[in-house]
Image (tube, rainbow, N blue to C red):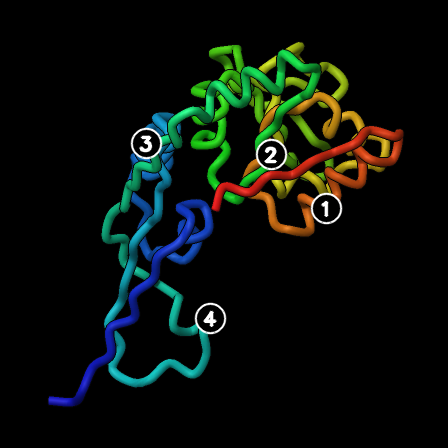
Amino acid sequence: QGATTVVTCKGAPEALRPLLSEVPADYDASYEQHASRGMRVLALASRTVSSQPDDRSTAEADLTFRGFLCLTSPLKPGTADVIKHLQASGHKCVIITGDNVLTAAHVARSVGILRDDQTWVLTANGESPVWRSGNSVKPFAAAPASGLCCRGDALASLSELQVAIVASRCSVFARFSPKHKETIVDALNKPGVTTLMCGDG
């Protein structure tokens, strides 16, 4: 028998989804349920190949879904109190993270950054940004008053003015790359706001 190679992959559920040969019917609902409880969720997939793949795109094609890895990351003691003191002294606190938006929203509620139970996420809908919460959709101009979160992939569809509005109104920025973070900080600094960033490492 010839030698075989097993290709294994892990990553964000939304990133691995298009690489799967078959997507379970409850795939999205399942990982979103875990993320909304504050878990960091990774999708796991694999495939067996008879020869060494030529490149990454070939290796990652037609993967078989193997499950979700759900990790908890408890808040550090005192985090909620620090946020409370910062807010009491007139600071606006936000979360900017590479994590799933539902995970970030759960953490934001746990520390008092988000106070609404409903989460409105700014997403890119073709070329028009829209606010989504479950099955509800609102146009960008009709933003709800609170519970606003922005996903990194929505930034490309925003004008400079819209970026400034999002930077000033959203409390959670998720699936953000370092470049996305820079865009938000620049938008905040432009009108003269002073921003401070604190890492969680």
Residue 49, numbered label: none
Three-letter code, disc 4: Ser
Image label count: 4
Task: State which tag comes first along the sequence, 1 or 3.
Answer: 3
The residues tagged by marks 1 and 2 sit, at their Cα atoms, a distance apart of 12 Å
Residue 53 picture quarter = bottom left
Task: State which tag comes first along the sequence, 1 or 4.
Answer: 4
Q: Of tags 3 and 4, which is closer to the observer? A: 3
Q: Nearer the viewer, residue 118 or 22?
A: 118
Q: List x then y, in percent, for residue 14.
A: 45, 45
What residue is rendered at 39% in x and 67% in y? 60
What residue is rendered at 48% in x and 18% in y? 81
Whether 177 is drawn above or below 104: the answer is: below
Task: State which tag comes first along the sequence, 3 or 2.
Answer: 3
Task: State which tag comes first along the sequence, 3 or 4.
Answer: 3
Residue at the spot of label 4: 57
What residue is rendered at 40% in x and 46% in y? 13
Whether 69 is drawn above or below 196: the answer is: below
Residue 34, numbered label: 3
The residues tagged by marks 1 and 4 sit, at their Cα atoms, a distance apart of 29 Å
In the figure, is residue 192 to the left or right of 155? right
The reply to whether the C-beta atoms of the residues labelled 1 and 3 are less than 8 Å apart is no
Q: Residue furthest bottom?
A: 2
Q: List x then y, in percent, for residue 73.
A: 34, 37
Q: Residue furthest left?
A: 1
Crowding near the residue tagged with mark 3, few <14, some 14–19, many ≥20 C-alpha atoms within 10 Å: some
Residue at the spot of label 1: 182
